[in-house]
Image (spheres, helix red, strand yellow):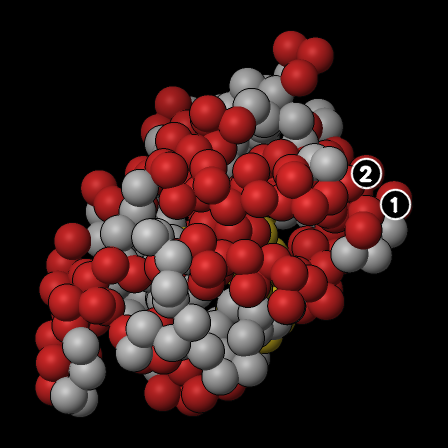
Amino acid sequence: MKKDLRRRLELPGVQNVRDLGGYQARNGLVTRWRRLLRGDGLHRLTPEGMELLNSEGLTSVIDLRSQAELEEEPNPYVDQGPVGFYHKPIYDDLAPALMATGQGADDDDPLVHFYLSALIDRAEAMRDILATIASAPKGAILFHCTAGKDRTGLVAALLLEAAGVDRQTILADYSLTREFIADLVKELLERTRESGGDAERHAQFLACAPLTMATTLEQIDRRHGSVSAYLTDIGLELGDLSALRDRLLAD
C-alpha cells in the first residue's frame, strides 16, 4: 500500500507524472492521494504504462495542449474505453515554439509574462478547465501539457490554492518538475535548433524557479485580492469551487 503514496509515478514513456496528494492544507486537512495527477505529454506512454496508470484508478485525462500539438503528438487516451478524454487547450495555438521566439517576453523573467497571459487573457479557458475537473467522474484525474511545467503548473497551483495549501508548498510542487525533465529539455532545445529558433532564449522558458510562480501568484493577489478571489472573478461557480476542494480533501 505504501507504494501508492509515491508522488512521482514511474511510468514507461513519461517523465513527469506526479500526484498532488499528501500536502498539508488548512484546518489540519491533507490533500488526498490519487485524486489529481499532473503530467507531461502522454504520446510516448507505452501500453504497459497505460495499464499501470489505469491501475491507479484513472478515470479522466485532460489534455491542455493546442490542437496542433494534439495532432502532432496524439494522446493515447482519445477514444480509449472507460477513461474519459477531454481536450481543453489553454491556448489555441501557443506552444513552446512560440515561447522560443521571445514574443511578448520583455520581463526580467519571461515566464511571468507567459503565465499572466494564460491566467488573464485566457481566463475563460482556465475556468472551463477547472469546471471540467470539478464535474469529472470520481477517480483519479490526470491533466497534462507537453513538459508538465507551465500550463500544467498553473492549473496545479490554482487547484492547490483552492484546497487551502500554503504558498510555499505550492512553489515547491511547481519546482519539482526540474528534477524530472532534463532529457525532455534537451529534446525540446534540439527541436528549436533544428527549426532555426533561438535555443538560448527558449532555454529561459524551460526553467522552473520557484520565484517565477511566486511572482505570478503575487501579481494575481494584487489584481484580485487573492487567488481564491481570482477564481470567482473569472466566473467559476461556487459549486465548482466546493467540488474542487472536496475532490482533493474529502474522504
Classify 240 as above or below 235.
Answer: above
Task: Give the percent coordinates (x, y) of residue 105.
Answer: 38, 66
Quarter of the image containing the N terminus?
top left
Asked which secondary structure carries label 1, the reply is helix
Name the kind of residue labelled 2 in the image.
Ser
Q: On the image, numbered disc 1 is attached to which residue?
A: 239
Task: Give the percent coordinates (x, y) of residue 172.
Answer: 38, 31
Left/right of residue 237 with respect to residue 71 in the rendered view:
right
In 3D space, how far apart are the residues under numbered discs 2 and 1 (Cα atoms)? 5 Å
Residue 248 seen in the figure: no
Q: Which is nearer the eye, 243 or 99?
A: 99
Q: Which is nearer the eye, 194 or 249?
A: 194
Name the kind of residue labelled 1 in the image.
Gly
Q: Are the two marked residues, 2 and 1, in contact with CB atoms closer than 8 angstroms?
A: yes
Left/right of residue 149 with respect to residue 120 in the rendered view:
left
Residue 71 seen in the figure: yes
Q: Which is nearer the eye, 79 or 223?
A: 223
Q: On the image, numbered disc 2 is attached to which residue?
A: 242
Task: Give the percent coordinates (x, y) of residue 49.
Answer: 32, 59
Residue at x-position 44% and y-position 53%: 112
